[in-house]
Image (tube, rainbow, N blue to C red):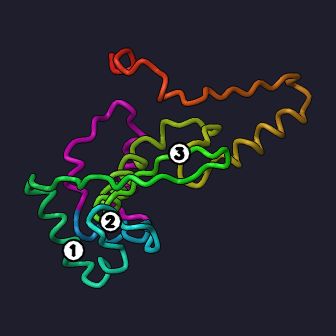
Amino acid sequence: MKPTSLQGIANKAASDQAYRFRNLFGLLTVEFLLWCWRFVNLRAASGVDREDARSDQENLRGNIERLVAAVRGGWYRAKLVLRRYIPKPNGKLRPLGIPATADKLLQSGVSKILEAIYEADFLDGSDGYRPGVGALDAVKALSAALRSGRYHYLVEADIRAFFDRIDHDKLIE
């Protein structure tokens, strides 16, 4: 069940689009992060600290209490991301970044807070990076639209290695 704090944020975001949320760090409480723990993959690879989620679970409340104290105290720093490369079918390698478990937990918490705020702004047909919908939903909607006969062409584009080739100075600018 979603915490009432998230439901309150979602309701406020839906009812007042001009509202500016403040002190979102205050939502990162021990109880909230204990709730977020359910979204951490316990079988995922460990990060640079070599601590996996199962070992963190042994003293979960204590670990989360220390994490919340570090965040609130201002001394929390995310660990470096462990870089691994996964082979692709074409023989090339795809880089994969693996954060530490504590960072994954905080990312999950921040993600849930931002979802509560921004979900009200998305259109019903927006299927990417949203809870409960994904690429397969977009494909189903596209297939239905094509079957309706309203559209006669479909164009697919893939810009190969886009972020490797883009002028990063212009992108930052």
Mark 3 sits on what residue?
129
Please tell me which residue is depicted at 23% across the width and 78% down the height of the picture: 61
- State the separation of the CA atoms marked 3 and 2: 21 Å
Stretch of the chain drawn in magenta:
1-28
Amino acid at pointer 3: Tyr
Q: Is residue 13 left or right of residue 156?
A: left
Q: Is residue 170 above or below residue 115?
A: above
Closer mark to the observer between disc 2 and disc 1: 2
Furthest residue in direction front, as rendered: 91
Please check the rendered image and state whether residue 71 is part of the magenta-colored stretch, yes or no.
no
Q: Quadrant of residue 52?
A: bottom left
- State the separation of the CA atoms marked 3 and 1: 29 Å
Please tell me which residue is depicted at 33% across the width and 15% down the height of the picture: 173
Which one is in front, 17 or 83?
83
Q: Is residue 105 above or below residue 24?
A: below
Amino acid at pointer 1: Asn
Closer mark to the observer between disc 3 and disc 2: 2
| Disc 2: CA contacts within 10 A as few (<14), some (14-19) or many (>=20) | many
Mark 1 sits on what residue?
63
